[in-house]
Amino acid sequence: MKMTLIYPRWPKLERQTEFHLPPHGPVVFAAAVPEEIELEFVDENRQTVDFDQCGELVALSVMLTAQLPRAFEIAAEFRARQVPVIFGGIAVMLHSEEVALHADAVFLGEAEGRFQQVIDDFRAGRLRKLYDYMGNPPDISLVGTARRDILKRDLYNYRGVQMLDLVHASRGCKFNCFPCCTGYLGGRRFRPRPIDKVIEELESIRNNRLFVVDNSLAQDRQWLKELFTAMAPLKKKWVSHPILDDDEILKLAADAGAWYVYQAVFDTSDVIRNRVRRLKEHGIGVEGTIILGTDDQDEDYIKRLVDFLMEIELDVAEFTILTPFPHSPIRAQYEKEGRILSNDWSRYTADKVVFRPKRMSPERLQELYYYAWETFYAGGGHQLKMGELFKRVVKREMEDGTFRRYDPKRRRGFQKQREAMAE
């Protein structure tokens, strides 16, 4: 049996350099697909969907709300050809009732140990409309090494630089930040993977540069100590979301290859100033993630915030507009207050105003979003600042002997060798 797995395209963040990371959700899901299934993967952000050449079943992996409109179009094309379509992924869990109108089946929750049932039902001609495992996650030890072999690696490089491979060491998040849906999606209980399983997966990834996509690396101090200690001998270089602000943990993270951190900058306090300083003192770069449009921000505050970012010498900044995604704490508040302006999911890209701000007009917030990008990058631009971060990681790789130029011909040579050995 053949199944086609598709990752729909979506509009990219305005003002940010466009690049394409290898998608994480599809390769993690693929590891839960029974081995006897012939799996074809299409990343529509880099490839074209051939509607006339597909498997007996089409699976749509939808991570972002902004992917939904295109996902619905793809599903309609296949269903018109009498090919059944099943949806899964983060955005599907957030929009399950709407998705059900466009699907033959909807899968909610984590797939490990569960997808065999879907295949059995499909083969028996009794595919269910809904497979609901929300709130009932599988044993975390069932999470295996993601199937990165389904990716066409040459599609994921930027100007000759191989993009980061994505990996996760835990699921769930004990925090409940106001713009975030993680508590609803993965639960508010921190669920770390066994460290030996994480290391086994890291060792299987040929790429030396990684993005550890855990929601937060600040949830369990002892586990972090053990994880970073185990990672250090691998000499990988990695990016992550916030790391616990603790000098011992930061040193261990740096020794384990922490390259730079996505650090939320939510005010101009000494707490943020000192957090950024400590990261830099440990040789860890900082990409600030800045949400514009919160209820405590007016025009003057946003301008002072941008000045503060330049004062503390952030390496890179990524500005987004507060977006009330379904099942986030802020969504319920804005719906109650009648402040949602649009449910056009194609606009939920975090660079467009889809709600009514408290202290300015929607139009002015949109203008200030552009102001923030233009002011912070007035001296060089996003690509130049990212280039500086890459210079640093290359220097570290050369010092520890792990630097390797990306060579697509060499990569294809390795692939041919593996295919020959398999034969």
Image (cartoon, grey):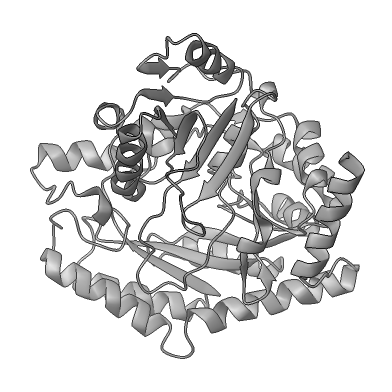
Rendering coords of residue 384 (x, y %): 55, 84
Residue shown at 42% from the left, 37% from the top: 90
Instruction: Give the residue at x 61% y 40%.
Output: 27
Q: Quadrant of the N terminus?
A: top right
Q: Nearer the viewer, residue 280 or 61?
A: 61
Asked whether, in this view, residue 54 is left or right of residue 378, the answer is right
Q: Quadrant of the C terminus?
A: top right
Residue 355 on image: x %, y %? 16, 53
Which image quadrant is residue 134 in? top left
- Depicted 203 relative to depicted 396: above or below: above
Q: Farthest residue in the left direction?
A: 338
Give the camera-side residue of 238 and 276. 238
User: Residue 331, percent across and down?
Assistant: 23, 40
Quadrant of the rendered image containing residue 24: top right
Q: Residue at x 38, y 24 (%)?
A: 106
Q: Quick check: 184 above or below 180?
A: above
As rendered, which of 43 and 51 lies closer to the eye? 51
For residue 7, side relative to residue 26 (left or right):
left
Q: How many marks?
A: 0
Q: Position of residue 2 (x, y in %)?
A: 58, 30
Q: Residue furthest bottom?
A: 379
Query: In the rendered image, is residue 233 in sight?
Result: no
Rendered view: 420 above or below 379 = above
